[in-house]
Image: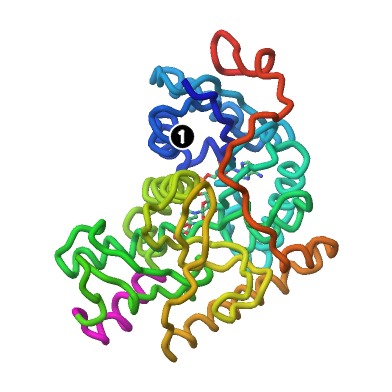
Amino acid sequence: MKQPVRIAVTGAAGNISYSLLFKIAAGEMLGTDQPVILQLVEIPQAMDKLRGVAMELEDCSFPLVHGITLHDNPFDGFKGIHYAMLVGARPRSKGMERADLLEANAAIFSEQGKALNDVANRDVKALVIGNPANTNCLILSRNAPDLDPSQFCAMTRLDHNRSLGILGNKLGVNPSDIDGVTVWGNHSPTMYPDLHNATALGESVIDQIDESWYKTEFTPRIQKRGAEIIEWRGLSSAASAAQAGLDHMRDWALGSEGKIVSMGIISDGSYGVAKGIYYSFPCICEFGSYQIVKDLEVNEYGQSMMKKTEQELLEEKAAVDHLLPADTAESRENLRTSTDGQTQFDNGVDAASAYYKADRIC
Ligand code: NAD
Ligand code: LMR
Protein backbone atom coordinates (compact mmCIF):
# COMPACT_ATOMS: atom_id res chain seq x y z
CA MET A 1 0.00 0.00 0.00
CA LYS A 2 1.36 3.44 -0.92
CA GLN A 3 1.67 6.16 1.69
CA PRO A 4 -1.19 8.69 1.58
CA VAL A 5 -0.53 11.99 -0.13
CA ARG A 6 -1.97 15.24 1.17
CA ILE A 7 -4.18 17.25 -1.15
CA ALA A 8 -5.46 20.70 -0.26
CA VAL A 9 -8.56 22.01 -2.00
CA THR A 10 -9.59 25.63 -1.48
CA GLY A 11 -13.13 26.81 -2.13
CA ALA A 12 -13.98 23.32 -0.94
CA ALA A 13 -17.62 24.16 -0.15
CA GLY A 14 -18.25 25.63 -3.61
CA ASN A 15 -19.72 24.26 -6.82
CA ILE A 16 -16.59 22.96 -8.56
CA SER A 17 -15.36 21.27 -5.41
CA TYR A 18 -18.68 19.50 -4.95
CA SER A 19 -17.75 17.51 -8.02
CA LEU A 20 -13.96 17.56 -7.72
CA LEU A 21 -13.65 16.23 -4.18
CA PHE A 22 -15.64 13.09 -4.85
CA LYS A 23 -13.61 12.28 -7.95
CA ILE A 24 -10.32 12.75 -6.09
CA ALA A 25 -11.61 10.60 -3.25
CA ALA A 26 -12.58 7.86 -5.72
CA GLY A 27 -9.02 7.73 -7.06
CA GLU A 28 -9.72 9.34 -10.42
CA MET A 29 -6.89 11.84 -10.05
CA LEU A 30 -3.91 9.94 -8.73
CA GLY A 31 -5.01 6.36 -9.25
CA THR A 32 -7.02 3.80 -7.37
CA ASP A 33 -3.91 2.64 -5.49
CA GLN A 34 -3.08 6.07 -4.05
CA PRO A 35 -4.56 6.87 -0.61
CA VAL A 36 -5.25 10.53 0.05
CA ILE A 37 -5.68 12.92 2.96
CA LEU A 38 -7.99 15.78 2.00
CA GLN A 39 -7.20 19.14 3.60
CA LEU A 40 -10.21 21.32 2.81
CA VAL A 41 -9.90 25.10 3.00
CA GLU A 42 -12.68 27.66 3.07
CA ILE A 43 -13.40 31.14 4.32
CA PRO A 44 -14.64 31.27 7.94
CA GLN A 45 -18.26 32.03 6.88
CA ALA A 46 -18.43 28.81 4.83
CA MET A 47 -17.13 26.39 7.47
CA ASP A 48 -20.58 24.99 8.33
CA LYS A 49 -21.30 24.24 4.69
CA LEU A 50 -17.86 22.69 4.41
CA ARG A 51 -18.60 20.39 7.35
CA GLY A 52 -21.67 19.18 5.48
CA VAL A 53 -19.57 18.39 2.39
CA ALA A 54 -17.02 16.55 4.54
CA MET A 55 -19.82 14.51 6.14
CA GLU A 56 -20.98 13.46 2.67
CA LEU A 57 -17.45 12.47 1.78
CA GLU A 58 -17.31 10.39 4.93
CA ASP A 59 -20.67 8.81 4.06
CA CYS A 60 -19.26 7.57 0.74
CA SER A 61 -16.83 5.34 2.67
CA PHE A 62 -14.13 5.83 0.06
CA PRO A 63 -11.39 3.33 0.88
CA LEU A 64 -8.67 5.68 -0.36
CA VAL A 65 -9.60 8.54 1.97
CA HIS A 66 -7.35 8.27 4.99
CA GLY A 67 -8.30 11.60 6.51
CA ILE A 68 -10.31 14.75 6.02
CA THR A 69 -9.40 17.98 7.78
CA LEU A 70 -11.23 21.30 7.62
CA HIS A 71 -9.46 24.64 7.75
CA ASP A 72 -10.44 28.29 7.65
CA ASN A 73 -6.99 29.51 6.63
CA PRO A 74 -4.26 28.31 4.26
CA PHE A 75 -1.45 28.28 6.82
CA ASP A 76 -3.21 25.39 8.57
CA GLY A 77 -4.73 23.86 5.47
CA PHE A 78 -1.54 23.67 3.40
CA LYS A 79 0.61 21.93 6.04
CA GLY A 80 2.66 19.19 4.43
CA ILE A 81 0.60 19.07 1.22
CA HIS A 82 1.84 17.44 -1.97
CA TYR A 83 -0.94 18.84 -4.18
CA ALA A 84 -2.98 22.05 -4.08
CA MET A 85 -6.16 22.52 -6.07
CA LEU A 86 -6.82 26.24 -5.69
CA VAL A 87 -10.46 26.68 -6.61
CA GLY A 88 -11.59 29.37 -4.17
CA ALA A 89 -11.53 32.91 -5.49
CA ARG A 90 -13.44 36.12 -5.14
CA PRO A 91 -16.17 36.22 -7.79
CA ARG A 92 -16.88 39.37 -9.77
CA SER A 93 -19.71 41.30 -8.12
CA LYS A 94 -21.96 43.94 -9.65
CA GLY A 95 -20.14 47.05 -10.78
CA MET A 96 -16.72 45.45 -10.22
CA GLU A 97 -14.15 46.19 -12.93
CA ARG A 98 -11.58 43.59 -14.01
CA ALA A 99 -8.86 45.57 -12.22
CA ASP A 100 -10.90 45.42 -8.96
CA LEU A 101 -11.31 41.68 -9.43
CA LEU A 102 -7.58 41.27 -9.96
CA GLU A 103 -6.84 43.27 -6.86
CA ALA A 104 -9.37 41.41 -4.66
CA ASN A 105 -7.89 38.10 -5.76
CA ALA A 106 -4.34 39.36 -5.34
CA ALA A 107 -4.92 39.48 -1.59
CA ILE A 108 -6.14 35.85 -1.54
CA PHE A 109 -3.40 34.44 -3.74
CA SER A 110 -0.53 36.34 -2.14
CA GLU A 111 -1.54 34.90 1.25
CA GLN A 112 -1.86 31.41 -0.25
CA GLY A 113 1.55 31.77 -1.94
CA LYS A 114 3.13 32.63 1.40
CA ALA A 115 1.38 29.68 3.03
CA LEU A 116 2.60 27.25 0.35
CA ASN A 117 6.07 28.67 0.73
CA ASP A 118 6.05 28.24 4.50
CA VAL A 119 4.21 25.00 5.18
CA ALA A 120 3.69 22.88 2.03
CA ASN A 121 5.83 19.89 1.10
CA ARG A 122 8.86 21.05 -0.92
CA ASP A 123 7.72 19.25 -4.10
CA VAL A 124 4.14 20.56 -3.94
CA LYS A 125 2.30 20.93 -7.24
CA ALA A 126 -0.25 23.77 -7.22
CA LEU A 127 -2.99 24.28 -9.80
CA VAL A 128 -4.92 27.55 -9.87
CA ILE A 129 -8.51 27.16 -11.05
CA GLY A 130 -10.06 30.30 -9.50
CA ASN A 131 -10.31 33.19 -11.94
CA PRO A 132 -8.53 35.15 -13.26
CA ALA A 133 -6.48 31.97 -13.13
CA ASN A 134 -3.29 32.97 -14.97
CA THR A 135 -2.69 36.18 -13.05
CA ASN A 136 -3.74 34.60 -9.75
CA CYS A 137 -1.09 31.97 -10.48
CA LEU A 138 1.52 34.64 -11.11
CA ILE A 139 0.71 36.27 -7.76
CA LEU A 140 0.82 32.90 -6.01
CA SER A 141 4.17 31.99 -7.47
CA ARG A 142 5.74 35.39 -6.83
CA ASN A 143 4.81 35.06 -3.16
CA ALA A 144 6.52 31.70 -2.79
CA PRO A 145 10.20 32.53 -3.16
CA ASP A 146 11.46 29.15 -1.96
CA LEU A 147 9.45 27.12 -4.45
CA ASP A 148 10.24 26.70 -8.13
CA PRO A 149 7.95 28.66 -10.52
CA SER A 150 7.38 25.43 -12.44
CA GLN A 151 5.54 24.05 -9.39
CA PHE A 152 2.60 26.34 -10.20
CA CYS A 153 0.09 26.09 -13.04
CA ALA A 154 -3.01 27.96 -14.17
CA MET A 155 -5.80 25.83 -15.55
CA THR A 156 -6.47 26.04 -19.29
CA ARG A 157 -7.29 22.33 -19.53
CA LEU A 158 -11.00 23.08 -19.63
CA ASP A 159 -10.45 25.12 -22.80
CA HIS A 160 -8.34 22.27 -24.19
CA ASN A 161 -11.01 19.68 -23.36
CA ARG A 162 -13.72 21.90 -24.81
CA SER A 163 -11.72 22.11 -28.05
CA LEU A 164 -11.43 18.31 -28.22
CA GLY A 165 -15.12 17.79 -27.51
CA ILE A 166 -16.44 20.31 -30.03
CA LEU A 167 -13.92 19.31 -32.70
CA GLY A 168 -14.66 15.62 -32.14
CA ASN A 169 -18.35 16.31 -32.76
CA LYS A 170 -17.57 18.25 -35.92
CA LEU A 171 -15.34 15.51 -37.37
CA GLY A 172 -17.34 12.57 -36.06
CA VAL A 173 -14.39 11.14 -34.11
CA ASN A 174 -13.85 10.33 -30.47
CA PRO A 175 -12.04 13.17 -28.61
CA SER A 176 -9.37 10.65 -27.63
CA ASP A 177 -8.55 10.17 -31.34
CA ILE A 178 -7.45 13.84 -31.55
CA ASP A 179 -3.94 15.01 -30.70
CA GLY A 180 -1.88 18.18 -31.14
CA VAL A 181 -4.51 20.76 -30.13
CA THR A 182 -3.04 23.70 -28.23
CA VAL A 183 -4.80 26.46 -26.37
CA TRP A 184 -2.35 29.35 -26.08
CA GLY A 185 -2.31 32.21 -23.59
CA ASN A 186 -4.82 33.40 -21.06
CA HIS A 187 -7.94 31.62 -19.74
CA SER A 188 -10.07 34.46 -21.08
CA PRO A 189 -11.80 35.39 -24.33
CA THR A 190 -8.39 36.25 -25.86
CA MET A 191 -7.15 32.64 -25.67
CA TYR A 192 -6.07 31.10 -28.98
CA PRO A 193 -7.30 27.56 -29.68
CA ASP A 194 -4.82 26.39 -32.31
CA LEU A 195 -5.73 23.48 -34.57
CA HIS A 196 -2.90 23.88 -37.08
CA ASN A 197 -0.86 21.02 -35.66
CA ALA A 198 -3.81 18.86 -34.68
CA THR A 199 -4.54 15.42 -36.06
CA ALA A 200 -7.62 13.23 -35.86
CA LEU A 201 -6.93 9.52 -36.29
CA GLY A 202 -3.52 10.58 -37.57
CA GLU A 203 -4.85 12.87 -40.33
CA SER A 204 -4.38 16.65 -40.34
CA VAL A 205 -7.40 18.41 -38.83
CA ILE A 206 -6.91 21.70 -40.62
CA ASP A 207 -7.25 19.91 -43.99
CA GLN A 208 -10.64 18.56 -42.93
CA ILE A 209 -12.31 21.74 -41.72
CA ASP A 210 -13.43 24.92 -43.36
CA GLU A 211 -11.27 27.95 -42.50
CA SER A 212 -14.28 30.17 -41.92
CA TRP A 213 -15.83 27.60 -39.54
CA TYR A 214 -12.51 27.48 -37.66
CA LYS A 215 -12.05 31.23 -37.39
CA THR A 216 -15.59 32.54 -37.03
CA GLU A 217 -17.42 29.70 -35.25
CA PHE A 218 -15.04 27.35 -33.47
CA THR A 219 -12.56 29.92 -32.11
CA PRO A 220 -15.07 32.39 -30.58
CA ARG A 221 -17.10 29.47 -29.25
CA ILE A 222 -14.14 28.10 -27.31
CA GLN A 223 -13.12 31.57 -26.19
CA LYS A 224 -16.59 32.32 -24.85
CA ARG A 225 -17.73 28.84 -23.86
CA GLY A 226 -17.73 29.75 -20.16
CA ALA A 227 -20.22 32.56 -20.82
CA GLU A 228 -22.32 30.24 -23.01
CA ILE A 229 -22.58 27.73 -20.16
CA ILE A 230 -23.56 30.47 -17.71
CA GLU A 231 -26.26 31.67 -20.13
CA TRP A 232 -27.87 28.23 -20.41
CA ARG A 233 -27.22 26.82 -16.96
CA GLY A 234 -27.58 30.00 -14.93
CA LEU A 235 -24.36 29.03 -13.14
CA SER A 236 -20.75 28.80 -14.26
CA SER A 237 -19.34 25.47 -15.39
CA ALA A 238 -18.61 23.24 -12.43
CA ALA A 239 -18.48 19.52 -13.32
CA SER A 240 -16.50 20.15 -16.51
CA ALA A 241 -14.14 22.48 -14.61
CA ALA A 242 -13.67 19.79 -11.95
CA GLN A 243 -12.94 17.17 -14.62
CA ALA A 244 -10.42 19.49 -16.28
CA GLY A 245 -8.68 20.15 -12.95
CA LEU A 246 -8.48 16.45 -12.35
CA ASP A 247 -7.16 15.77 -15.88
CA HIS A 248 -4.52 18.49 -15.50
CA MET A 249 -3.23 17.21 -12.17
CA ARG A 250 -3.38 13.53 -13.20
CA ASP A 251 -1.33 14.15 -16.33
CA TRP A 252 1.14 16.41 -14.52
CA ALA A 253 1.68 13.80 -11.80
CA LEU A 254 1.39 10.58 -13.80
CA GLY A 255 2.18 11.62 -17.41
CA SER A 256 0.17 12.56 -20.50
CA GLU A 257 1.18 9.38 -22.37
CA GLY A 258 2.86 11.29 -25.17
CA LYS A 259 -0.15 13.51 -25.86
CA ILE A 260 -0.01 17.28 -26.02
CA VAL A 261 -1.96 19.02 -23.26
CA SER A 262 -2.47 22.76 -22.69
CA MET A 263 -1.12 24.08 -19.39
CA GLY A 264 -0.82 27.62 -18.05
CA ILE A 265 2.82 27.62 -17.01
CA ILE A 266 5.62 30.08 -16.37
CA SER A 267 6.90 31.37 -19.69
CA ASP A 268 10.58 30.71 -20.32
CA GLY A 269 10.48 32.81 -23.49
CA SER A 270 9.53 29.89 -25.77
CA TYR A 271 7.73 30.94 -28.97
CA GLY A 272 8.76 34.56 -28.20
CA VAL A 273 6.31 34.85 -25.29
CA ALA A 274 7.42 37.36 -22.63
CA LYS A 275 9.20 35.62 -19.75
CA GLY A 276 7.74 35.58 -16.27
CA ILE A 277 4.00 35.40 -17.03
CA TYR A 278 1.80 32.31 -16.71
CA TYR A 279 0.80 31.55 -20.30
CA SER A 280 -0.81 28.44 -21.72
CA PHE A 281 1.62 26.36 -23.82
CA PRO A 282 1.52 22.94 -25.47
CA CYS A 283 3.11 20.51 -23.00
CA ILE A 284 3.92 16.85 -22.65
CA CYS A 285 4.08 15.49 -19.11
CA GLU A 286 6.37 12.71 -17.97
CA PHE A 287 7.93 11.61 -14.66
CA GLY A 288 6.01 14.21 -12.63
CA SER A 289 7.02 17.23 -14.67
CA TYR A 290 6.10 18.93 -17.91
CA GLN A 291 8.03 20.07 -20.95
CA ILE A 292 6.95 22.65 -23.51
CA VAL A 293 6.65 21.14 -27.00
CA LYS A 294 9.01 23.47 -28.79
CA ASP A 295 8.95 22.76 -32.49
CA LEU A 296 5.36 23.49 -33.52
CA GLU A 297 4.80 25.67 -36.54
CA VAL A 298 2.90 28.88 -35.88
CA ASN A 299 1.69 30.83 -38.91
CA GLU A 300 1.18 34.59 -39.16
CA TYR A 301 -2.45 34.37 -38.02
CA GLY A 302 -1.39 32.29 -35.03
CA GLN A 303 1.37 34.70 -34.11
CA SER A 304 -1.03 37.63 -34.05
CA MET A 305 -3.50 35.64 -31.91
CA MET A 306 -0.71 34.63 -29.51
CA LYS A 307 0.47 38.24 -29.21
CA LYS A 308 -3.02 39.47 -28.39
CA THR A 309 -3.48 37.09 -25.48
CA GLU A 310 0.11 37.73 -24.30
CA GLN A 311 -0.64 41.47 -24.35
CA GLU A 312 -3.69 40.93 -22.15
CA LEU A 313 -1.62 38.98 -19.62
CA LEU A 314 1.03 41.70 -19.59
CA GLU A 315 -1.71 44.25 -18.92
CA GLU A 316 -3.09 42.13 -16.08
CA LYS A 317 0.43 41.85 -14.68
CA ALA A 318 0.86 45.63 -14.89
CA ALA A 319 -2.42 46.08 -12.98
CA VAL A 320 -1.11 44.03 -10.04
CA ASP A 321 2.57 44.86 -10.36
CA HIS A 322 2.53 47.03 -7.23
CA LEU A 323 1.41 43.93 -5.28
CA LEU A 324 4.13 41.59 -6.59
CA PRO A 325 7.22 41.19 -4.40
CA ALA A 326 10.18 42.63 -6.33
CA ASP A 327 12.61 40.06 -5.01
CA THR A 328 10.97 37.17 -6.89
CA ALA A 329 10.92 38.91 -10.29
CA GLU A 330 14.28 37.62 -11.47
CA SER A 331 13.90 34.05 -10.27
CA ARG A 332 10.66 33.71 -12.26
CA GLU A 333 12.63 34.44 -15.41
CA ASN A 334 15.59 32.15 -14.77
CA LEU A 335 14.06 28.78 -14.34
CA ARG A 336 15.62 25.80 -12.69
CA THR A 337 14.80 22.30 -13.82
CA SER A 338 11.48 21.04 -12.56
CA THR A 339 11.00 18.52 -9.77
CA ASP A 340 11.92 14.93 -10.51
CA GLY A 341 8.52 13.37 -9.97
CA GLN A 342 9.45 11.64 -6.73
CA THR A 343 6.96 12.55 -4.04
CA GLN A 344 8.80 13.33 -0.85
CA PHE A 345 7.30 12.44 2.48
CA ASP A 346 9.58 14.21 4.88
CA ASN A 347 7.03 16.91 5.52
CA GLY A 348 7.28 17.41 9.23
CA VAL A 349 3.55 16.94 9.83
CA ASP A 350 2.60 15.00 12.92
CA ALA A 351 0.19 12.81 11.01
CA ALA A 352 -0.76 10.54 13.87
CA SER A 353 -2.03 13.31 16.11
CA ALA A 354 -3.43 15.68 13.50
CA TYR A 355 -5.00 13.52 10.85
CA TYR A 356 -6.15 10.15 12.02
CA LYS A 357 -9.13 10.96 14.21
CA ALA A 358 -11.80 8.34 14.67
CA ASP A 359 -14.51 10.24 12.84
CA ARG A 360 -12.06 11.24 10.10
CA ILE A 361 -13.33 14.83 10.09
CA CYS A 362 -11.32 17.16 12.30
P1 NAD B 1 -18.34 28.98 -5.98
O1 NAD B 1 -18.66 30.41 -5.70
O2 NAD B 1 -19.43 27.97 -6.01
O3 NAD B 1 -17.28 28.46 -4.89
C1 NAD B 1 -16.14 29.20 -4.57
C2 NAD B 1 -15.84 28.89 -3.13
O4 NAD B 1 -14.61 29.51 -2.81
C3 NAD B 1 -16.88 29.45 -2.14
O5 NAD B 1 -17.35 28.40 -1.32
C4 NAD B 1 -16.10 30.49 -1.35
O6 NAD B 1 -16.51 30.56 0.01
C5 NAD B 1 -14.69 29.96 -1.49
N1 NAD B 1 -13.62 30.96 -1.27
C6 NAD B 1 -13.62 32.25 -1.62
N2 NAD B 1 -12.49 32.83 -1.20
C7 NAD B 1 -11.76 31.88 -0.60
C8 NAD B 1 -10.51 31.86 0.04
N3 NAD B 1 -9.78 32.97 0.16
N4 NAD B 1 -10.05 30.70 0.57
C9 NAD B 1 -10.80 29.57 0.47
N5 NAD B 1 -12.00 29.53 -0.11
C10 NAD B 1 -12.48 30.67 -0.64
O7 NAD B 1 -17.51 29.00 -7.34
P2 NAD B 1 -17.13 27.77 -8.29
O8 NAD B 1 -18.19 27.60 -9.31
O9 NAD B 1 -16.70 26.62 -7.49
O10 NAD B 1 -15.89 28.42 -9.08
C11 NAD B 1 -14.69 28.72 -8.38
C12 NAD B 1 -13.73 29.54 -9.23
O11 NAD B 1 -13.34 28.79 -10.38
C13 NAD B 1 -14.32 30.84 -9.79
O12 NAD B 1 -13.32 31.83 -9.70
C14 NAD B 1 -14.59 30.53 -11.26
O13 NAD B 1 -14.60 31.68 -12.05
C15 NAD B 1 -13.40 29.64 -11.54
N6 NAD B 1 -13.50 28.79 -12.74
C16 NAD B 1 -12.35 28.61 -13.46
C17 NAD B 1 -12.36 27.81 -14.58
C18 NAD B 1 -11.10 27.60 -15.37
O14 NAD B 1 -11.20 26.97 -16.43
N7 NAD B 1 -9.91 28.06 -14.96
C19 NAD B 1 -13.55 27.19 -14.97
C20 NAD B 1 -14.70 27.36 -14.21
C21 NAD B 1 -14.66 28.18 -13.08
C1 LMR C 1 -15.32 28.96 -17.61
O1 LMR C 1 -14.47 29.00 -18.50
O2 LMR C 1 -16.28 28.18 -17.65
C2 LMR C 1 -15.21 29.91 -16.44
O3 LMR C 1 -13.94 30.49 -16.38
C3 LMR C 1 -16.30 30.92 -16.53
C4 LMR C 1 -16.36 31.84 -15.35
O4 LMR C 1 -16.39 33.07 -15.59
O5 LMR C 1 -16.42 31.38 -14.21
In the image, is 314 to the left or to the right of 15?
A: right
Q: What kind of residue is marked 1?
A: Leu
Find the residue positioned furthest to the bottom: 300
Taking depth in this image into account, of 101 and 358 the one nearest to the observer is: 358
Q: Judge whether 94 appears above or below 76 on screen.
A: below
At 71% from the left and 46% from the top, the residue drawn is 112
x and y percent of residue 80 in the render? 68, 32
Find the residue positioned furthest to the right: 327
At 38% from the left and 75% from the top, the residue drawn is 194
What main secondary structure does the magenta stretch of the protein show? helix
* Residue 221 lies in the magenta-colored region: yes
x and y percent of residue 241 in the render? 42, 51
Find the residue positioned furthest to the left: 172
Taking depth in this image into account, of 165 and 334 the one nearest to the observer is: 334
Q: How many numbered marks appear?
A: 1
x and y percent of residue 337 in the render? 65, 57
Q: Which residue is mark 1?
A: 21
Quarter assignment of residue 120: top right
Q: Give the class, few, some or many, for how many residues have Cα within 10 Å of label 1's Cα (few <14, many ≥20).
A: many
Q: Judge whether 339 appears above or below 214 on screen.
A: above
x and y percent of residue 26 in the render? 39, 29
At 60% from the left and 37% from the top, the residue drawn is 82
Task: Name the element at disc 1.
Answer: helix
In the image, is 72 to the left or to the right of 167?
A: right
In the image, the segment drawn in magenta is 208-223
At 40% from the left and 35% from the top, the residue drawn is 23
Q: Judge whether 105 appears above or below 166 on screen.
A: above
